[in-house]
Image: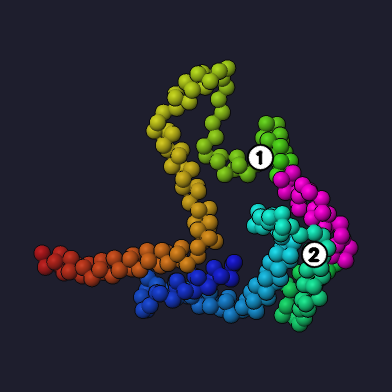
Amino acid sequence: MGYEQLEAIARGLAQVQGSQPESNYLDELQIQVKRALVKNRTTAEDLKKAYQILLQVAKSLRYPPSSYKLSSDQKVNSQQVAQEITQLIHETKPSGRVQKAQISLFDALSRRWNLYNQELLYCYDIPGLPQDNLKMERLFGCLRRHQRRISGRKSTRELQDLGQAQVLFTSQSFPELLDLIQRVPHATYQEYRHRLAEAELPRQFYSRLHRDPDTTIASLIKAHLTRRSNLFHLKTFVPHKEEKINTV
C-alpha cells in the first residue's frame, strides 16, 4: 500500500509542469519519489506476490467467515481444507534473493502447517466452533480498557484522541446532569469543538491518503496550481503599482 501511495504521489507530481520558483520543492520531491520507486520496485513486487499467496491461503480456509456465507450444500470439511492447503504448499516454491517476503511467508506457513495442521481444522467439523477468537479478544480488550479508565492506572487511546473534549460531571440524577451540561456556554463549546476538529485534520488527511491516494494528491496539486497562478498574477500587477507610486 505504501508503494502504491508513492506511485499515486508520482502521478500527481507529474501534473506540475514548467519551471516556476513556486514549484521547486515539488520538482525536488518528484525526483526523490521516483528514486524511491526505482529502489523499492523489486521489494514491492515481492510483497505483492506474497500477499497473493496469503489471499490464496485465506481462500482455502474460507476466511474471514463473513466473506464466505456458504449454504448447507457448500459446507467444507477439514479434509477438503487440508487438501487445498497441502496442494498450495506444494505448488508454492519461492526462491532467490529477491523473494524474501515470499520465502518468509512460505516458511512460516509450512512450519505451522507441519506442526498444527489438524489442530487448526476442528472448526470445520464442529458446528458453532468459530475459526478465531477475535470476538473474545475484543470483549476482553473492552473490559480491560474500561477497567483502566475508571481506575486511572493507565490512559487509553480513546482519551488521547478525544482529550480536547473531555468533561466530567458529578450528579445524582439525569435532570441535574442536563442542567450541568446546559450551563456550559455555547461559545466555549464551539471553541473546543473547533479545537477537536483541528486536531483531527492530520489523522483525516492520512486516512484519505491511505484510502484514495490518487484523489488526495490530485486535490493537493490542484490547490498548489491555483496558488501558483494567483502568485503569478500578483507578481504581474506589482510592478505597475510600484511604477504608479514612483510617478506620483
Query: Residue at point 55% right, 25% down?
Result: 169
Position of 78 with respect to 140 (left or right) is right
Q: Residue furthest front?
A: 73
Label drawn at residue 187: none
Label drawn at residue 80: 2
Label drawn at residue 155: 1
Q: Quadrant of residue 150?
A: top right
As helix, strand or loop, the secondary structure at mark 1 comes to loop
Where's residue 35, x and y in %? 56, 78
Query: Residue at point 29% right, 65% down?
Result: 230
Closer to the N terminus: mark 1 or mark 2? 2
Locate the N terminus by quadrant.
Answer: bottom right
Where's residue 120, x and y in %? 83, 57
Q: Nearer the viewer, mark 1 or mark 2?
A: 2
As helix, strand or loop, the secondary structure at mark 2 comes to helix
Q: CA distance from mark 1 to mark 2?
A: 47 Å
Query: Residue at point 77% right, 81% down?
Result: 95
Q: Are marks 1 and 2 in contact (CB under 8 Å)?
A: no
Position of 39 with respect to 89 (left or right) is left
Where's residue 13, x and y in %? 45, 73
- The part of the chain drawn in magenta is 113-137
Locate the C terminus by quadrant.
Answer: bottom left
